[in-house]
Amino acid sequence: MYINKRGIDGDFDKGLVTRYGALELSPSAGVLNYGQGLLEGIKAYRTEDDRLLLFRPDQNALRMKMGAERICMPSPSVETFVDAVKETALANKRWVPPPGKGSLYIRPLLMGTGAVLGFAPAPDYTFLVYCSPVGNYFKGTFASLDLTIEDELHRATPGGAGGVKSITNYAPVIS
């Protein structure tokens, strides 16, 4: 797990890779009370010659940067984001499945971890990256999908935050 903390007047500087573990949060952390958090999802794949491949992590970094702007959060630079993803993937290389058997799912998270009990941005932020091996989403050939069109409830509304990967985006559709 990669972790990087930033205070209100600082920048995200060099974080560090550490063992996966629990986080300590104030009950009044911005992420808990006001949903001030963003997530991304990236996969690392192992090649036949034992290299790791990432698909456009810079684009995930740009989306996080745009999302952070939208919900009044500072964000790590594209370079810091990409470096953190690479460091996390390399530190966990042994967990990447063999070619064709799955991937290493990498979860970058940005959240307001500073205590704030009032409608305002958090004073402190944490950027972290953790990962887990996963199997192939589709096994064998692509099967047909059963889809439902929802026309009464909406995840993304005009002027809302549905266009960014806010931690609150998926809650309404978990079943």
Image (cartoon, rainbow, N blue to C red):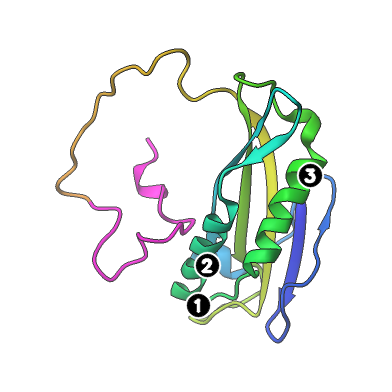
For the C terminus, the quadrant is top left
Q: Are marks 2 and 1 in contact (CB under 8 Å)?
A: yes
Residue at the image point whose x is 70% and y is 87% from the top: 9
Q: Is residue 155 above or below residue 174?
A: below
Earlier residue among tags 3 and 2 = 3
Q: What residue is pinned by disc 3?
A: 20
Q: 3 or 137, which is in the foreground?
A: 137
Q: Which residues are magenta?
A: 154-175
- Secondary structure type for disc 1: loop
User: What amino acid is found at the position of numbered circle 2 in the picture?
Assistant: Gln
Q: Which mark is residue 97?
A: none
Residue at the image point whose x is 73% and y is 42% from the top: 89
Q: What residue is pinned by disc 1?
A: 72
Q: Is residue 95 above or below residue 84?
A: above
Q: Which mark is residue 36?
A: 2
- Secondary structure type for disc 2: loop
Residue at the image point whose x is 64% and y is 43% from the top: 106
Q: Horizontal and vertical percent for residue 41?
A: 55, 46
Residue 1 appears anywhere in the view: no
Q: 137 or 153, which is in the foreground?
A: 137
